[in-house]
Image (cartoon, rainbow, N blue to C red):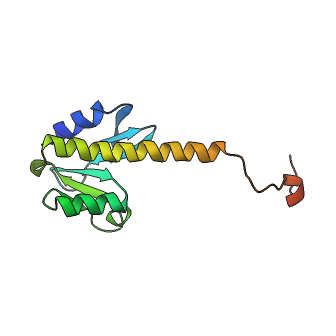
Amino acid sequence: MTAADFRRIALSLEGVEEYPHAELPAFRVGGRKFASLASQVAGYGNLMLTLEQQAAFVEEAPEIFLPIPGGWGKMGHTHIRLAAASEDVLMGALRTAWKLRIDQNAMTRRKKLVPERSGLTDKKRGKRRR
């Protein structure tokens, strides 16, 4: 696979848009990034995964997947070696990152919509309303 394949597959997922991030293509859904092309290592893509997903991908195909070095990798950000990946593997990995972002976006929206459940009103907390 190539960077062009990464772009084509990412953009085939529902609601995805491409935008420049550090002068390289990045891909988001619902306004939030889930994947990008690697900035420092040509021929790599980046996926935003959970640590559990990252561990599963790396364990299953260490020749294709590796954690991004440093703190980003410790948060689940994962390189995919494009030349070593088949179209099915790349599609599956991008779909996993995309679905995770969709689910995270939905959770964020729900948190904003659910009113505080403590039962305390502003008056009981001693706060003034303006």
Q: Is residue 84 left or right of residue 126?
A: left
Instruction: In this rendered view, identify the residue nearer to me: 23 or 120.
Output: 120
Residue 24 visible to an observer of this rendering: no
Q: Is residue 37 left or right of residue 98?
A: left
Quarter of the view holding residue 9: top left
Residue at image point 38% right, 63% down = 75
Image coords of residue 57 (percent x, y)? 24, 57
Q: Quadrant of the N terminus?
A: top left
Q: Is residue 3 left or right of residue 130?
A: left
Instruction: In this rendered view, identify the residue nearer to me: 107 or 41.
Output: 107
Quarter of the view holding residue 71: bottom left
Residue at image point 10% right, 51% down = 84
Q: Reply above or below: 116 against 126.
A: above
**How many numbered discs sit on the rendered protein?**
0
Residue 28 visible to an observer of this rendering: yes
Residue at image point 27% right, 66% down = 69
Image coords of residue 14 (percent x, y)? 36, 31
Residue at image point 21% right, 40% down = 6
In the displayed orientation, state which residue is furthest to the left.
83
